[in-house]
Amino acid sequence: MSFQEIVAMFLYTLAHHKENRSIGQYFFRSGETVSRQFHLCLRAFLKLHEVLLYNPTPILDDCEDERWKFFKNCLGALDGTYINVNVPSQERTKYRTRKGTIAMNVLGVCAPNLQFIYVLPGWEGSTHDMRVLRYALSSPNGFRVPRGNYNLVDAGYTNCEGFLAPYRGQRYHLKEWTDRQPESAEEFYNMKHARARNVIERYFGLLKGRWSILRSPSFFPIRTHGRIVMACCLLHNLIRKFMPRDDINEDELNESDDDSERDSNDEREFITSVATSDHWTNFRNKLDQDMFNDWRARGRHGQ
């Protein structure tokens, strides 16, 4: 069996979510062969995670992207998503989400160019997003955020060093701004924050749209399903790297496709915990005032 055929069967399984027997009929192979080669390809592909995960560059002072230019030193956006799974009946309570579905909780972090920076699949659907983030930060070889940089997060996360959240109790979601302008610095900040952080929600939507195996419970055990989620994210990065004009509207991205060189992390200090601080609260307060004053100085034109 050729390498090309093995990869083709692997991609076909992810894209169409068919059982081994159906895939075997399509490729004229036995179900056992399909299963064996799928797991072989999956293990091999996961070994490329350090190569395929994107190494982000912070938003610079000269950034002209209206969505990101105020968020200097920001690396990207972070959120959790649910991937439906099949689990034994005795495990269903742990995997039941607040919406009642049986799913795993997947933490994803992506850069403004819609490439994944970090992925942590496999947590039970009942687990709070903050617990998943704390685990990611404290784990060896886990999620690494250099001090001085940060990611955008939603209101479900704590506003703290490395993680910039919106103001609670203020309008936030994009649909709330369709026919109204912000009336305060906090509202303007929330609007700009939502438009930038939307990159991760668009990414998850694209990911599930591309790989059918992520849209419904798979035939695989939960541990394998977690590895499949990671593989799908890595494949997306690979596609974005070599085929930047896929089914995303490129006019909305305003991105650079240049590769980011991986700097040595030996000399850098990283955030390892999440905790509120006056410094980070003041940072957000100053940022919202600067953004709001700039908008008013321009005559409230452009959002």
Image: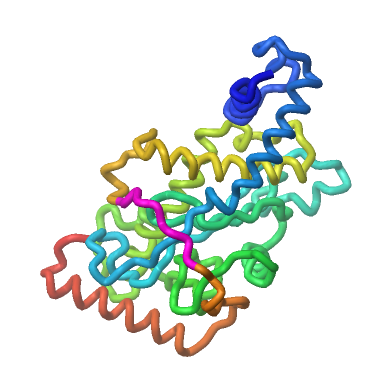
- Could you say which is closer to the camera, residue 148 or residue 248? 148
293 shown above or below 93? below
Q: Position of residue 292 (x, y in %)?
A: 24, 75
The quadrant where residue 22 appears: top right
Closer to us: 141 or 91:
141
Task: Write the start and end of the magenta stretch as one range.
Answer: 255-263
Task: Place residue 190 in its image quadrant.
Answer: bottom left
Let me know if residue 258 is in the magenta part: yes
Per the picture, the main secondary structure of the magenta-coloured stretch is loop
Whether residue 168 is visible to the viewer of this picture, yes or no, is: no
Task: Say how the picture is coloured.
Answer: rainbow
Question: As rendered, which of 84 and 149 lies closer to the eye?
Answer: 149
Does 108 appear above or below 10? below
Residue at the spot x=76%, y=38% of the render? Answer: 86
Q: Residue at x 39, y 56 (%)?
A: 112
| Residue 79: image location, x then y, percent | 53, 58
Give residue 139's position: percent from left, percent from top: 69, 68
**In the displayed image of the protein, which residue is found farthest to the bottom?**
278
- Furthest toward the right, the residue is 90
Q: Split into 4 quadrants, where in the image is the C terminus? A: bottom left
